[in-house]
Image: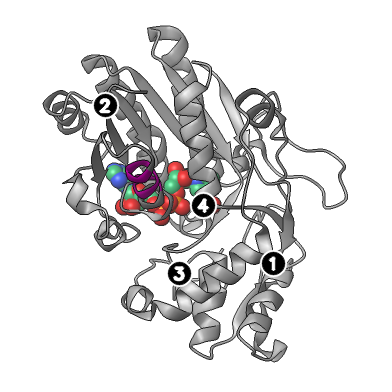
Amino acid sequence: GSVPTTILVTGAAGFIGSHFVRHWRTRHPADRVVAVDALTYAGNRENLADVEPGVVFRQADIRDQDAIADLLSEHRVDVVVNFAAESHNSYAVLRPVEFFETNVAGTVALLEAVRRTGVGRFHHISTCEVYGDLALDSPDSFTEESPYRPRTPYNASKAGADHAVRAYGLTYDLPVTITNCANNFGSHQFPEKVIPLFTTNALRGLPLPLYESSHNRREWLHVSDHCAAIEAVLDRGRIGATYNVGSGVEADVETIADLVLDHLGLSPDLKVTVPDRPSHDRRYLLDSALVRGELGWRPSIAFEEGLRRTIDWYRDNRAWWEPLIGRSPVAEQTAWAGR
Ligand code: NAD
C-alpha cells in the first residue's frame, strides 16, 4: 500500500526470515522493519548484515509474551510475520519437547501478544510436512483441504501451531493467514540441511551421507519465490485463508547429491549410505492452484539453475559457513543427521 507499514518479522536471523527481510526492504523501502530473533544455534545476525542499517533488530524469544507485546506497542506494529521455529527434523527426534515449546507454545504466546495489542495482521509460516507423506508412485498432491497427518515431532509441532493460528482467527476474530510451503533452498541456509550439507561437505572433500531411502523425494522452491508468495498473501490474501506454496518440481536426495558433485567437478564416489532417520517421510507434493489462481503468484527460478547459483554461493562464501560447521546440535550425535 501507499501508507508506510511497520512489519515485525520473527525468526528474522534464520534462513528464510532473513531473505524475507531483504525482500521486504527492497520491495517496500518506506516501511519500517522490526527484526526479532532469539538467536538460537540456527540464528545468525550476520544474515542481516547487509540490511541492518534500515532495520531495527531486537533479540527476543517468541515464548516471552510480555517482551513481544512490549515490542508490538513500542513500535506500533501493523503486521507480524512469524518465521520463528525450531526447524530441523533430525534435531526434533532428539529434543521433541523443545520443538513443541517453541513451535506450538511460542506461536500461542505470539498470538496472545497480538491479541492484547490489536495488531492488524498476523501471517504464519508453515510447511507441507503437516499433511504427512505420499507414496512415491502416488498421483495425489496435498490441497489446503487435505487432512493433517504429521508423522514426526517437527511436523506435529508445526501442525499444532497451524491449528492454534486458525483457532485464534476464528475465536478472537484475529486477521490471520497461513502459508504451507514446500522445501526451500538458497543462500544462507544453515549447513545442517541437505543441500548446504552436501555442498559444504563436497567443498571440504568429505563424503555426502545419503540415507538408505535416498529415493525419497522433496518438492523444491527457491527461497526468493517463497518470499514473493508471502508478499502476495500479505498484499491480497483472504483473511482466515491458508495457501499451499510449491513449485511442483520434485527431486530425490540422490539426484541432488549427483547435481552438487557434477557442478563442483567431483567424483560420484563421494556418496556414502547411512542408516535412515526414524519415520522419514517418503515424499510431499503440494497442489498450489489456489495461490496461483487467486493471487497470480508463480515461481520464477528453475530448480537446477537455482541449485547451481546456491552451490556457487557456498563456494564463494566459505567465511559465512565455516564458523557454523559443528554448531548444529545433531552434527556428531546421529548417523542420520543432516536432513
Ligand atoms: P531456521 O532454523 O534457519 O530459522 C529459524 C529462526 O528462528 C532462527 O533464526 C532461530 O534463531 C529463530 N528462533 C528459534 N526459536 C525461536 C524463539 N523461541 N523465539 C524467537 N526466535 C526463534 O529455519 P528456516 O528454514 O528459515 O525456517 C523458517 C520458518 O519456515 C520455520 O517456521 C519453518 O518451519 C518454516 N518452513 C521452512 C521450510 C524450509 O524448507 N526451510 C519450508 C517450509 C516452512
Q: CA distance from mark 2 to mark 3?
A: 36 Å
Of circles 2 and 1, which is in front?
2
Residue 153 appears in view: no
Disc 2 target residue:
4
Q: What residue is at 26 percent from the left and 63 percent from the top?
A: 46
Q: CA distance from mark 2 to mark 1?
A: 43 Å
The amino acid marked with disc number 4 is Val
Disc 4 target residue:
223
Of circles 4 and 2, which is in front?
2
Of circles 2 and 3, which is in front?
2
Q: What residue is at 73 percent from the left and 60 percent from the top?
A: 251
Q: Residues within 10 Å of mark 2 (few under 14, many from 20)?
A: few
Badge 3 element: loop
- For disc 4, does the CB lie below 8 Å from ligand 1? yes
Q: Is residue 231 above or below residue 268?
A: above
In the rendered structure, which segment of residues is drawn in magenta?
20-26
Residue 260 appears in view: yes
Q: Is residue 190 above or below residue 326?
A: above
Q: CA distance from mark 3 to mark 4?
A: 15 Å
Disc 3 target residue:
191
Farthest-out residue, front: 2
Left or right for 231, reference 280: left
The amino acid marked with disc number 3 is Pro
Disc 1 target residue:
253
